[in-house]
C-alpha cells in the first residue's frame, strides 16, 4: 500500500442544520454567523474539488459523475450499463481511494474539501486507471464513427495517417 488512503469527508451534523435553517444560537453568539460563513467556503471548495474530478474523468475516460453529499461526500460515477460496479469499486478502493457501492449499485468515489491538489489528482487518476484497464474505456470512444460510411472513412484516414508517419 502506497501512501495514506484518501477518505471521503464525513459531513458534520451541523451541516444539515445550517442548510435547513434549524441552527440557532444565543443573541450575542458569533458561532452561528461564523459557521454559516465556513459552510459557504467549504461548499465552494467542495464544488471546486468535484468539478476538477468531474472534468478529469470526462476528459480521460469520458465518464461523467454527480456530486453526492450525504453522510460522506462522493462523486457517483455514471458507468456504462452492465458494468460490474462492485468490481470497479473494489479496484478503486485498492488504489488508496475510498470507493464503495450504494444500494442502487452505483460506484461512489470519495471527495473532500480538505484534499490537497495532489489528492484531487489521485482521485482522478485511480478511477481513470481502473476504468481504462477493466472496461477498456477512454474519452475518444465517444467520438468513434457510428455508421458504416463513417467507419470506412475513419479507417481510410487512419491508414493514410499511418502511412504518412512511416
Image (cartoon, rainbow, N blue to C red):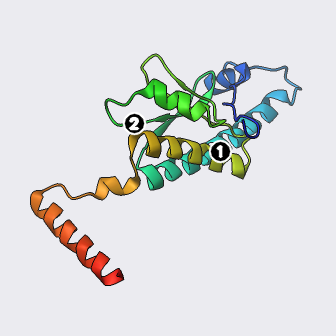
Q: Residue at x 41, y 36 (%)?
A: 78
Q: Residue at x 81, y 20 (%)?
A: 25
The residue singled out by tag 2 in the image is 79
Residue 25 located left or right of residue 117: right
Which SS class for mark 1? Answer: helix
Question: Residue 135: x percent and y percent?
Answer: 39, 40
**Mark 2 burial class by Cα count in 10 Å: few <14, some 14-19, many 20+:** some
Residue 160 located left or right of residue 84: left
Q: Residue furthest right?
A: 28
Q: Residue furthest left?
A: 149
Question: Residue 36: x percent and y percent?
Answer: 73, 34
- 50 is higher (above) or lower (below) than 32: below
Residue 50 located left or right of residue 8: left
The residue singled out by tag 1 in the image is 44
**Mark 1 burial class by Cα count in 10 Å: few <14, some 14-19, many 20+:** few
Q: Residue furthest front?
A: 166
Q: Which of the pair 58/95 is nearer the observer?
A: 95
Which SS class for mark 2? Answer: loop
Residue 93 located left or right of residue 27: left
Give the position of the N terminus as an image quadrant: top right
Amino acid at each position: 500500500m502506497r501512501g495514506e488512503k484518501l477518505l471521503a469527508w464525513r459531513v458534520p451534523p451541523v451541516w444539515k442544520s445550517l442548510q435547513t435553517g434549524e441552527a440557532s444560537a444565543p443573541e450575542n453568539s458569533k458561532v452561528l454567523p461564523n459557521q454559516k460563513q465556513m459552510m459557504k467556503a467549504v461548499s465552494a471548495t467542495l464544488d471546486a474539488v468535484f468539478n476538477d474530478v468531474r472534468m478529469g474523468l470526462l476528459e480521460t475516460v469520458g465518464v461523467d459523475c454527480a456530486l453526492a453529499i450525504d453522510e460522506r461526500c462522493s462523486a457517483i460515477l455514471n458507468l456504462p450499463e452492465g458494468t460490474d460496479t462492485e468490481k470497479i469499486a473494489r479496484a478503486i478502493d485498492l488504489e488508496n481511494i475510498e470507493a464503495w457501492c450504494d444500494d442502487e449499485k452505483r460506484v461512489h468515489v470519495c471527495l473532500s474539501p480538505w484534499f490537497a491538489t495532489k489528492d484531487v489528482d489521485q482521485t482522478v487518476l485511480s478511477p481513470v486507471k481502473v476504468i481504462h484497464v477493466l472496461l477498456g474505456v477512454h474519452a475518444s470512444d465517444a467520438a468513434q464513427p457510428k455508421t458504416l460510411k463513417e467507419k470506412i472513412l475513419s479507417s481510410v484516414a487512419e491508414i493514410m495517417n499511418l502511412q504518412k508517419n512511416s
